[in-house]
Every structure is written in structure tokens, then in C-alpha cells.
């Protein structure tokens, strides 16, 4: 069965974005030739789950090929129906049902890239199998929190920690079965 992995960065105080969905704090750790394992991670996936606001931000800042590179399916979780564009599917159905269907299909693993509403819905339903969280050495003080309240307690199994000379610390956990 395919697994769903969260690969995301957050500030030390737990925010994945400033107010107004601003992700500019991620630039604090940009370094020529360093991708923090992202390339290796994405080589093992063929499906991406992403919230519409995160998708829109990345589309504006980087462009559509960041997600839809012709090699994978991209599910943008949205409340507003929209026609499919290439391999990008705008999905407004039941998220749990989508994940269960995708996990049961043949293929590589599934990558959840945010946003917070999608992540917390998946956590609430215990659908995330692996969490890779990069801690950016900054305190934002406000914005969009990675973890929201009102989800069940979950015990995680430690896999590894990586540190980088930029100050980024990457935590890797799996959910216990």
C-alpha cells in the first residue's frame, strides 16, 4: 500500500506561513546546491495533495511546472469546482475518501505539501504515515500554524534528524501502526 508523507517547513514557533500566506521566511535557508533532501524525496512520489491557497501561492511565485511536471498527478483540494488542467485535478469531494482510494491504487508514494487545513484534516483522520518537518531558524510570531487543535493524540516513531549549516533542522517521524 502506498504511504502519504508530509514534507514541509515551519518556523521554530510552529508557523508554515506568515499572515497573508507569505512564505518568504523560507528564503532564510536558501543555499546554492542545497535542496534539503527534496529531490530525493520527490523521486519516490507520483502524486501530490495540496491545498488551493498553497497551490495558488506556488503557482504565482514559481510557476505551474513546480507541481505538474507531467510525471505525477496533482490534487488541489478546493471548495470551488474547476476543470482539470493537465495532470492537475481540482478536487472538492471527501478528502478521506480520496486518500483511501489513492493509497489503495498502484504507484509510488503520495506527498502532502499543505496547507494547514488539508494537513490537519489528514491528521484528524490518521491518514498521514510519515512526517518530515524542516525547522527554519526564525520565530514568526504570527501566521498559519502547522498543527491545529481538535485532532486526536498520535504517538510517532522517531526515524532520524538531520542538521544543516544554514541552521535548518529536519525531523523525520513515522506514525505508529
Image: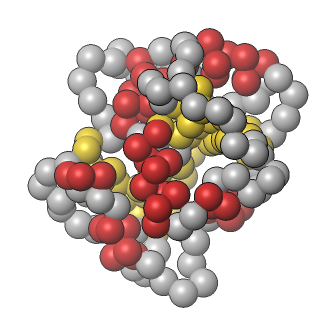
Total residue callouts:
0
Q: Which residue occupies the foreground of this view, 163 or 104?
A: 104
Q: Is residue 128 visible?
A: no
Q: Residue 11: where, in percent of width, then height? A: 28, 57
For the point 67% across and 61% down, the residue is 65
Q: Which residue occupies the foreground of this view, 11 or 113?
A: 113
**Which residue extends farthest front?**
83
Quadrant in which the N terminus is drawn: top right
**Which residue extends farthest right?**
106
**Quarter of the view holding residue 69:** bottom right
139 w.r.t. 44: above or below:
below
Quadrant in which the C terminus is drawn: top right
For the point 53% across and 67% down, the residue is 62
**Quarter of the view holding residue 4:** top right
Q: Is residue 91 visible?
A: yes
The image's colour scheme reads secondary structure
Q: Which residue occupies the foreground of this view, 61 or 37?
A: 61
For the point 41% across and 63% down, the residue is 169
83 w.r.t. 121: above or below:
below
Q: Residue 60: where, in percent of width, then height? A: 46, 62
Q: Which residue occupies the foreground of this view, 10 or 116?
A: 116
Q: Is residue 153 left or right of residue 131?
A: left
Q: Is residue 22 left or right of residue 100?
A: left
Amino acid at each position: 500500500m502506498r504511504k502519504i508523507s508530509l514534507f514541509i517547513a515551519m518556523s521554530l514557533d510552529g508557523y508554515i506561513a506568515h499572515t497573508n500566506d507569505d512564505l518568504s521566511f523560507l528564503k532564510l535557508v536558501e543555499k546554492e546546491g542545497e535542496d534539503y533532501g527534496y529531490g530525493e524525496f520527490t523521486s519516490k512520489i507520483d502524486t501530490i495533495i495540496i491545498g488551493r491557497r498553497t497551490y495558488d501561492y506556488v503557482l504565482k511565485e514559481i510557476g505551474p511546472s513546480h507541481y505538474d511536471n507531467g510525471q505525477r498527478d496533482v490534487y488541489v483540494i478546493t471548495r470551488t469546482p474547476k476543470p482539470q488542467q493537465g495532470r492537475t485535478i481540482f478536487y472538492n469531494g471527501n478528502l478521506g475518501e480520496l486518500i483511501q482510494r489513492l493509497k489503495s491504487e498502484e504507484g509510488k508514494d503520495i506527498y502532502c505539501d499543505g496547507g494547514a487545513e488539508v494537513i490537519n484534516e489528514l491528521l484528524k483522520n490518521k491518514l498521514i504515515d510519515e512526517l518530515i518537518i524542516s525547522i527554519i531558524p526564525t520565530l514568526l510570531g504570527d501566521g498559519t500554524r502547522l498543527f491545529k487543535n481538535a485532532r486526536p493524540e498520535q504517538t510517532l516513531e522517531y526515524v532520524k534528524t538531520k542538521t544543516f549549516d544554514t541552521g535548518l533542522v529536519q525531523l523525520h517521524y513515522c506514525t505508529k501502526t
